[in-house]
Image (spheres, helix red, strand yellow):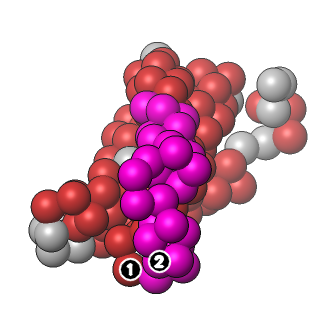
Amino acid sequence: MQGKKNIATGFLFLAGFMVYGFVLIYLRDFAPGKEQWIADYAIGKHFESRLAHVHGNLFAIINILVGYLLLRLPVAPESAKWISWLTLAGMLMPLGILSEVAFGLPPLLVLAGGFAMVLAMLWFGVAALKLRTGDLQL
């Protein structure tokens, strides 16, 4: 039963990055020094912070969708397992962006997460092509 952990993790990740969005709103609209934040909004750490927010929410929704589809479609068990784990690993990308911004870490998690998500989508696409029309009962 692959997919349940993607749905649960996706919703939790979505909630976390939604809260992070409120932090970004606070920094832009209410924090002391907000004028400098606004002035630097399109460059450097500010831009990367928004990238993390957007990718975190996007990858959370992708995990929810992949989880649902893995529960509903007759994808081969071994493929379903790998697609599930690779999609979860994809969430390393926005975490990696945050770790770059907050701690100055190198972009290893960004690359690993991005690669994992692309591989998961390619694998799922191939698995979907192998399904027969009668198998698609969503």
Return the residue nearer the eye: 132 or 123. Answer: 123
Q: Quadrant of the C terminus?
A: top right
Q: Which of 24 and 122 lies nearest the eye of the viewer?
A: 24
Mark 1 lies on residue? 44
Which SS class for mark 2? loop
Going by the image, does 24 lie left or right of 91? right
- Hey, what amino acid is under mark 2? Asp
Which residue is located at x 68 percent, y 49 percent? 128
Left or right: 84 in relation to 59: left
- Badges 1 and 2: C-beta atoms under 8 Å apart? yes
Counting from the top left corner in percent of width and height, residue 127 is at 60, 50
Secondary structure beneath disc 1? helix
Structural distance between the alpha carbons of marks 1 and 2:
8 Å
Question: Which stretch appears magenta?
Answer: 16-43
In this picture, is 24 found above or below 44? above
> Does the segment drawn in magenta span residue 135?
no
Q: Disc 2 designates what residue?
A: 40
Query: Which residue shows up at 30% across the image and 57% down it?
Result: 98
Please state which of residues 21 and 63 is positioned toward the viewer in this rendering: 21
Kind of residue at disc 1: Gly
Mark toward the viewer: 1 or 2: 2
Q: Which mark is residue 61?
A: none
Residue 6 appears left or right of 98: right
Give neighbour class at mark 1: few <14, some 14-19, many 20+ (Cα, 10 Å): few
Mark 2: few/some/many CA within 10 Å (<14, 14-19, 20+): few
Residue 137 position within the rendered picture, expressed as x and y whole percent measured from the top left: 83, 25
